[in-house]
Image (cartoon, grey):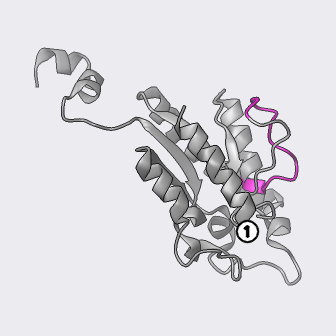
Amino acid sequence: MNVLNKLNPLKRFFKHPSDRRSHRFIMVIDCILNQNSRDLGAANYPSMNKEILRLCMQYDIGLFQIPCPEITFLGFLRKRKPGQSIRDALDTAAGRECCRNLSIDITLRIQDYINNNNKILAILGGNPESPGCAIHSVSPNTGCESLAENSGVFMKEFHKALCKQKITIPFRGMRDCRPDWIKQDLKWLENLFNQ
């Protein structure tokens, strides 16, 4: 290693002629890339949402897979009290703390990516009824007040963690429960990638 690289190791990382990374990526919830992680009866694809992956490949956009908050807190089978919904289980002190801790860990990784010349284009959440990952916007892309109260428990905690660090990234639900909605969401995503 030469003297310049010892003084600034990142200079070598960003200037290396064989490094072809785009420095652009999106963050996606677990079930976009792995429908097997969805609750029983909620999978809309056999394995993954291939349309989102095709767009990412077409525009050279990287993917960061967000762990499922429901599985993190309740386990794969979403074990909870009889009659208790997943949302009600997540929306407890312990559930919110789990979501908050997961959010803080991810936010620290995001900050590290940003500090190293990367751009996170969007955070893609789930369907409107997702207990943990629904995204409902009050006013899209306007900063820290844009996520509505009826959004998923995890997404609200994640949004708070990002805002606390003054990180603004657009949130968008990928609503694959209806063909017309996912078509709108994919159009939004492609427009974002084209910017």
- Judging by the rendered image, the residue that carries numbered circle 1 is 177
Q: Is residue 126 visible?
A: no
**Figure label count:** 1
Residue at left offset 48%, top offset 58%: 53
Q: Work out whether 88 lies above or below 156.
A: below
Q: Quick one: quadrant of the N terminus? A: top left
Q: Work out whether 46 lies above or below 138.
A: below
Residue at left offset 72%, top offset 50%: 155
Q: Is residue 144 magenta?
A: yes
Q: Main secondary structure of the magenta part?
A: loop
Residue 190 occupies quadrant: top right
Return the residue nearer the eye: 194 or 103: 194
Q: Is 12 positioned to the left or the right of 140 in the image?
A: left
The three-letter amino acid code for the residue at tag 1 is Cys
Q: Magenta residues?
A: 141-154
Q: Residue furthest left?
A: 2
Q: Is residue 172 magenta?
A: no
Q: Is 42 positioned to the left or the right of 83 in the image?
A: left
Q: Quick one: quadrant of the C terminus? A: top right
Residue 29 percent coordinates (x, y): 60, 58
Residue at left offset 69%, top offset 43%: 171
